[in-house]
């Protein structure tokens, strides 16, 4: 991996690692965020906080006509139906409160 000049972080006079504000913004990191990290042989790996969802799969119906062997629907004992519009709107509104908005896939 080749680093670009804007890809550098620096250590301030108090020994704190500072990443560029644009990078923090792009990853939804706000002042006070706690960012987990891991040390590897020659690397320091920063991880997004667990509160930062990466993906959300929202299934608005269980009316699938496929018979996939691994599908969780095969173990459900629920009537066939679909999510009510009001519930859908509340879920989407709730997702928008996250500081790092996840990508969403809708299954219909």
Image (cartoon, rainbow, N blue to C red):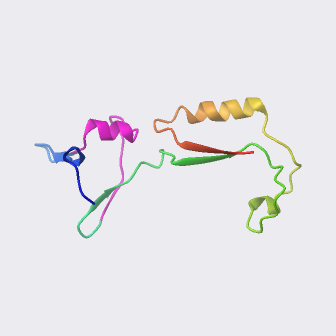
Residue 83 drawn above or below residue 71: above
Q: Which image quadrant: the C terminus?
A: top right
User: Residue 66: x, y in percent?
Assistant: 81, 59
Q: How many marks?
A: 0
Name the foreground residue: 45 vs 66. Answer: 66
Identify the residue at horizontal 59%, vertical 43% (top origin).
104
Identify the residue at horizontal 25%, vertical 43% (top origin).
19
Residue 47 seen in this snapshot:
yes
Q: Is residue 64 left or right of residue 46?
A: right
User: Residue 13: x, y in percent?
Assistant: 10, 43
Range shown magenta: 18-39
Q: Is residue 92 left or right of residue 28?
A: right
Query: Picture quarter containing residue 70?
Result: bottom right
Q: Is residue 22 left or right of residue 54?
A: left
Reply yes or no: does residue 37 show up in magenta: yes
Reply yes or no: does residue 19 show up in magenta: yes
Identify the residue at horizontal 28%, vertical 60% (top origin).
1
Residue 29 seen in this snapshot:
no
Name the foreground residue: 30 vs 108. Answer: 108
Furthest-left residue in this view: 13
User: Residue 3: x, y in percent?
Assistant: 23, 54
Query: Picture quarter containing residue 92?
Result: top right
């Amino acid at each position: 991996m080749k680093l670009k000049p804007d890809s550098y972080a620096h250590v301030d006079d108090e020994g704190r690692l500072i990443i560029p504000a644009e990078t923090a913004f792009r990853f939804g990191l706000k002042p006070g965020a706690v960012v987990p990290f891991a040390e590897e042989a020659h690397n320091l790996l920063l991880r997004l906080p667990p509160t930062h969802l990466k993906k959300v799969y929202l299934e608005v119906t269980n009316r699938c006509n496929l018979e996939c062997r691994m599908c969780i629907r095969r173990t459900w004992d629920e009537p066939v139906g679909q999510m009510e519009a009001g519930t859908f709107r509340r879920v989407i509104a709730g997702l928008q409160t996250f500081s790092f908005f996840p990508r969403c896939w809708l299954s219909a």
